[in-house]
Amino acid sequence: MTTAAPGKAGGRRVLVPLALAQFICSFAGSSMNVMINDISEDLDTSVQGVQVAITVFLLVMAALMIPGGKLTDRWGRKRCLMLGLAVYGVGALLSAAAPGLGVLILGNSVLEGVGTALLIPPVYILTTLLFTGTAARAKAFGAIMALGGIGAAAGPLIGGLLTTAIGWRANFGFQVVVVALILLLTRTLEDPLPPDPDRPFDAVGAVLSAAGLVLLVTGILAADDNVWLMTGLLAAGAAVLAGFFGWIRRLERSGREPLLATSLFRDRVSNLGLVTQNAQWLVLMGVSFTVGAYLQVVRGYSAIATGGVFTAATLGLLASSLGAERLAKRWSQRSLIVTGFVTTTAGIVVLLLLVRAVDDIWAFTPGLLLIGLGLGLMLTPSVNVVQSAFPDSRQGEISGLSRSVSNLGSSLGTAIAGTILVAELTNGGYAAAMIALAVFGVVGLGAALLLPHDRPAGAPERSAVDHSAPEH
């Protein structure tokens, strides 16, 4: 199906609620990083307890994003978006009133995670369907990724302000207000494709994929407590995911529709794009947690001071993200992603060197600024590379996979960097966590360098699906 791009005014009406939806979900993932001391004291828990809450939220998103993307075909994109917003809003309300860590995990980690898994795939599917052409999609994804990146980068700043002025629970009240606004703005949103209630849903595949991801990330979280438990969980996770791929191949051979078609993994360009997405969000959320925890727990800074430092990352990300359309016309997507990883990795190195040499909170700003600039350069082209590799009929599948991979990166970033940091919080943990994140930045750069050379959007376009995998 070919969908005409909306007019300028109509485009704004579509983009505002979609971009706000990405903003609030990204905000939720990072804003808690400046509330670590406040939450742990109020709820009588530890830094590790707050880390678990943050990681579980990101993990639930990653584990359920693929089934969420698949359900958009069956229930319709708008219906999934509205349902996801409603579940998210209930979770935010419950979190605001949480009397203990268990209720906070139920509200924030579980309900908000489930809501996000339902509402985010429609954001990217609707954007891909409503905006055609590399330049138009770059502009639309640029707006969405800009607000998403700003939500992640500015989460600590906004969270710090609200926590200091009112209390940490006000952060969840803020989320409820934004969700209510999005629900109001999406009332007139039209779904370009009709839902297909008879579309089969692979429940076994959904359970296997979710269980495998949960076991893997839980294994990483267990690393500082019990090496044998970590090894067992990682092995179990790998075995369950192997079983998942065996299951979907079995369904395909029998002519039934699996949760994910194996052909999604046969497109080299899309696969490389997914690796870059995973690395980007792993670095962003890993840096956010590491810097936030280090400043509060080790250096003893307040929530508002910690959040203020992240303004540098927010400004950098905002500056480069808002120029996505102009940059896409002058530079190829590959060039932008490569430059983004080089800049981001350089920022991590600066964070490591300057902070060790200068005993001042503002020593964090140059590195965070570089990280924000680098991430803003590459978030949009990475999404566009993956989404544009497949036709409209497969956007439900690839959107779910794309968002799952990105959110898996977020949960891995918090789990890996957080586990390293918490294990050696006052004795080299910060440096070790930053070095680990720099390694993942280099991995992302390697994947970006393997992307084929493409043309800027201002040059004559090739077909958006020239390199897509054949349908089976």
Image (tube, rainbow, N blue to C red):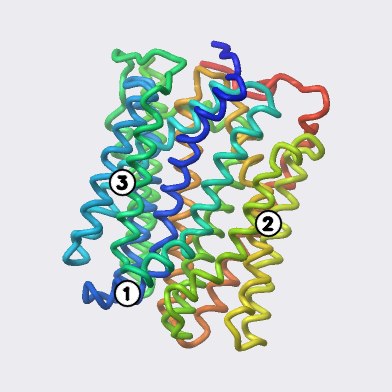
User: Neighbour class for label 3 at 10 Å: few (<14), some, many (≥20)?
Assistant: some
- Disc number lying in front (3 or 1): 1
**Horizontal relation, residue 150 to residue 451: left or right:** left
Write the residue at 56% across / 14% down: 3
Dot 2: what SS? helix
- Disc number lying in front (3 or 2): 2
Of mark 1 and mark 2, the one earlier in the sequence is 1
Question: Which of the 4 image quarters holds residue 101?
Answer: bottom left
Write the residue at 32% across / 68% down: 166
User: Neighbour class for label 2 at 10 Å: few (<14), some, many (≥20)?
Assistant: many
Q: Which mark is residue 373?
A: 2
Question: Which of the 4 image quarters holds residue 374?
Answer: bottom right
The alpha-carbon separation of the residues under discs 3 and 1 comes to 32 Å
**Location of residue 66 with respect to 211 vertically, above or below:** above
Dot 3: what SS? helix
Contact between labelled residues 1 and 3, with CB atoms less than 8 Å apart: no
- Residue denoted by label 1: 38
Q: Amino acid at mark 2?
A: Leu
User: Neighbour class for label 1 at 10 Å: few (<14), some, many (≥20)?
Assistant: some
- Residue denoted by label 3: 211
